[in-house]
Amino acid sequence: MNDSRTVLTDTEQRIWLEAFHLEGGEPDEPWSIDKWTIRGGPGDGIDVIDIDNGCLSVSVLPTRGMGLWKARCDDLSLGWDSPVRRPVHPSLVQTADAGGIGWLGGFNELLARCGLASHGAPGVDHVSDAKGVATEVPVTLHGRIANLPAHKVEVGTDSDGRLWVRGEIDETMLFGPCLHLASTFATHPGSNRISLHDRITNLSGREAEFEVLYHTNIGRPLLGPGARLVAPARRVIPRNQHAADDIRQFDVFASPDVDYVEQCYFLELQSDDADRTLVVLHDAGGQRGLALEYAIHPLPCFTLWKNTMADADGYVAGIEPSTDYPNPREFERANGRVPTLAPGASWDAHIDFVALTTPEEVNESVARVKSLLGETSTRLVEMPLPNLCPAD
């Protein structure tokens, strides 16, 4: 395979390809890259890029912040059944609706990136200008990036067989954050792994705060009664008293319950000598699962979101690495967790999403998680901690 690169979108060069197809590989291991555009319904105008490596296929949405819509590995579907049944064009998502949670009106991806200037709960922040004058700024749920289209999109292949799609997005405004995201999804023919590399750059002449959370959402068939999260957690902290009531079962999922109220837990994870950690969500029988492998240093925080309400209402679990916790930005800043970038500086993160389609793969990944903990035992904190959990 030779290196190749095709520009699908470049607004500065007036390039936009409505459709694109590339294929190759051996007869027993074919691969393809397809670009198409949704027509009709709330997703009208959303570009979709499908990468199929012969084992794993994924659908990337450049129009929706380079989110990962869905994936399939062999016969295992990855994603969830959101009440938002299909992708929604960003122009139709009113993030300020319903007290700042309008972001949920477009939420149905396997991976929805949250940020870049803020993520987490809606509320009010106070931002100071260069002279220290503070202004009250409303902050909506999970920020803007998931509803911003990429202005440049490329796909390609490398000589080592790597298949990739790359998108660039600006989250900018006058007198506000000026952040650039360059995001690449990549895989190899026959692999059960899709790798994400994100680089965020501060385009401003001033130091800038940023927050990023990788909202990875798992529903059926992996999620079901008895499904389990396996993570090398040194400590587990409930987000509120409601979550604290079930701290002993934080890692086990229940049957759908129409009266269920979401619960969140903050996990402090152990890494290896190379700064890598691993979390696994597998089904009740340990037959299949999904693993996330990544470096702790750029993503030191991790949230488990349990939302096992009725299937029709969004039966789902979120496994969410992040720069800081999904609390109001003002609270996270006060506790010293909001990272900053100097003018022109960049931040990088790399996450591998690994589909586990056999009991052997699940067992191997679970054993790796346990090896990360070693002799360390997981401490379950019985109540919310004031420096991690704002009062309800």
Image: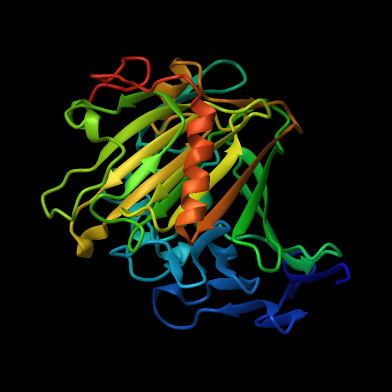
Above or below: residue 160 compared with residue 354: below
How many marks on residues? 0
Residue 159 location (% of width, % of height):
86, 65
> Can see residue 306?
yes
Q: Position of 203 compared to 300: left or right?
A: right
**Screen quadrant of the N terminus:** bottom right
Residue 170 location (% of width, % of height):
64, 50
> Can see residue 143?
no
Q: Residue at x 51, y 24 (%)?
A: 374
**Residue closer to the observer: 343 or 325:** 325
**Residue closer to the observer: 115 or 324:** 324
Q: Residue at x 74, y 32 (%)?
A: 345
Which residue of the protein is positioned furthest toward the left in this rendering? Answer: 259
Q: Position of 191 compared to 330: left or right?
A: right
Residue 39 location (% of width, % of height):
49, 83
Above or below: residue 381 compared with residue 78: above
Image quarter of residue 327: top left
Q: Residue at x 41, y 61 (%)?
A: 79
**Residue closer to the observer: 180 or 299:** 299
